[in-house]
Amino acid sequence: MKDYIAFFDLDNTILNTSSGKLFVRYSYDKNVIGFRELMLGLFVAVVHRMGLSDTEKTINKWAMKYKGTSESELIDFTQNWFQEVVVNHFRKGARDEINFHNRNGGKTVILSAATDYICNPVKNYLNMSDVLCTDLEVADGKLTGRIIGRYCYGEEKLLRAAEYCRQEGFHLERAYYYADSFSDLPVLERVMKPICVSPDRSLARIARKRGWAIREW
């Protein structure tokens, strides 16, 4: 029986970069997308991190590009991408913290805006407990181009984390959350242990003002 939950963001926290950037570059290298789609994907990753656009609307448009894609083919593709690319981008500090919580009675959970096709290989590789993320809708073995529910970003992360704690019998106020972005503030403000990992400028300023832990991994 686990005693508490340690939530971890994925991009720029467990990983030292954006999984979205890695994925679109890999897709381009494998001739799955063209140069224009590569540039669009990199642009989406940038505006997502900086919070410069209606992120959910942008992601919904991006998801439509995968309408009709075979789920089994996507799983195979992302597994190859993970083994060839992602394994080279883990932060050592993240590995150490995840191992620490696993050894000390913590339930380690990825809380990320990325999709389950990206998060699940990371969870399995690091022996983590669970994933809360953005889910893509599948019908008859193919992606519909829609996401299930809301995009797991900002306030939605807080709703997901709170509901997960309620269902699993934990208290969010006793949890840890490791994250890098100002957009993660809703969850960071609610947990017992907010830990800012190589934070962006806005989050770093808030962390210093509130005395939150800052880790430069």
Image (spheres, grey):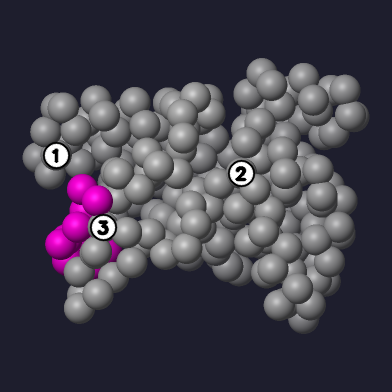
Q: Which of marks 2 and 1 is nearer the N terminus?
A: 1
* Along the viewing direction, whichever of 132 and 148 lies nearer the viewer: 148
Amino acid type at circle 1 is: Ile
- The vertical placement of 88 against 72, above or below, is above
Residue 78 in percent (x, y) is at: 28, 55
Report the residue marked by disc 2: 154
Report the residue marked by disc 1: 33
- Residue 95 is at least partly visible in this image: no
The residue drawn where x is 82% and y is 51% is 191
The residue drawn where x is 42% and y is 64% is 148
Q: Residue 112 carries which label?
A: none
The answer to whether the residue labelled 2 contacts the one labelled 1, judged by CB atoms less than 8 Å apart, is no
Q: Quadrant of residue 121?
A: bottom left
Q: Quadrant of residue 107?
A: bottom right
* Along the viewing direction, whichever of 147 and 108 lies nearer the viewer: 147
Q: Neighbour class for label 3 at 10 Å: few (<14), some, many (≥20)?
A: some
Residue 201 in percent (x, y) is at: 66, 18
Magenta residue span: 64-76
Quarter of the rendering occupied by the C terminus: top right
Q: What element carries label 3?
A: strand
Report the residue marked by disc 3: 145
Amino acid type at circle 3 is: Gly
- The vertical placement of 52 against 34, above or below, is above
The residue drawn where x is 55% and y is 46% is 153
Amino acid type at circle 2 is: Gly
Quarter of the rendering occupied by the N terminus: bottom right
In the figure, is residue 163 to the left or right of 15? right
Q: Could you tell me what secondary structure mostly forms the magenta stretch?
A: helix
- The vertical placement of 89 against 133, above or below, is above
Mark pair 2, 3: CA separation: 22 Å
